[in-house]
Image (tube, rainbow, N blue to C red):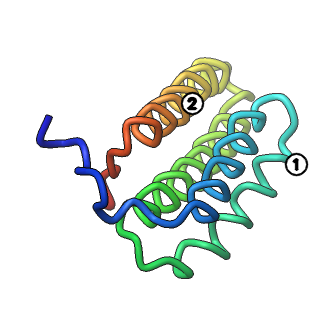
Amino acid sequence: MNDIIEAGADIGSEPERNTLLIAYVLHALGPFTFLTAIAGVILNHIKVNDTASAFIKSHHRWLLRTFWFGLLWSILAGVLMVIGVGFIIYAVVVVWYIYRIVRGILSFTERKPLPMG
């Protein structure tokens, strides 16, 4: 239970948490429509430095890293489609992306910060 932030601890304001939840929803819709993921990453870039809350900042950074590394590996997978291994890489990227979004949402609901590194 030490991982859960105690009541009254630095979990951000209600508007910050609502904005973060919107960002998670936008990223979660990303596999179905890439435009929502772009909107989510723009929101994350705008809000990541607007908060003093380490909890909120850790979640914004988590989503930023998820988007940019996912995009990088998706582009690599697209290039490698020519030799056939791109499909495998892309499948792994999709599973990894879903894992990151689900883990982030679970940590958000449990009020746990995510690794910043």
**Going 52% across and 80% down the picture, which residue do you hit?**
49
Query: Label 1 to label 2, Cα distance in Å?
Result: 18 Å
**Precedes in sequence: disc 1 or disc 2:** 1
Disc count in the image? 2
Query: Mark 1 — residue?
Result: 35
Residue 72 location in percent, x, y? 60, 50
Viewer-side residue, 97 vs 80: 97
When the figure is inspected, residue 86 is found, relative to residue 48, above or below; the finding is: above
Horizontal side of 111 relative to 83 (left or right) equals: left
- Residue to which mark 2 is pinned: 93
Q: Quadrant of the N terminus?
A: top left
Q: Residue at x 64, y 64 (%)?
A: 15
Quarter of the image where one finds residue 27: top right
Q: x and y percent of residue 106 in the render?
A: 45, 31
Q: Quadrant of the C terminus?
A: bottom left
Whether residues under marks 1 and 2 lie with C-beta atoms below 8 angstroms apart, the answer is: no
In the rendered view, does 69 fall on the left or right side of 46?
A: left
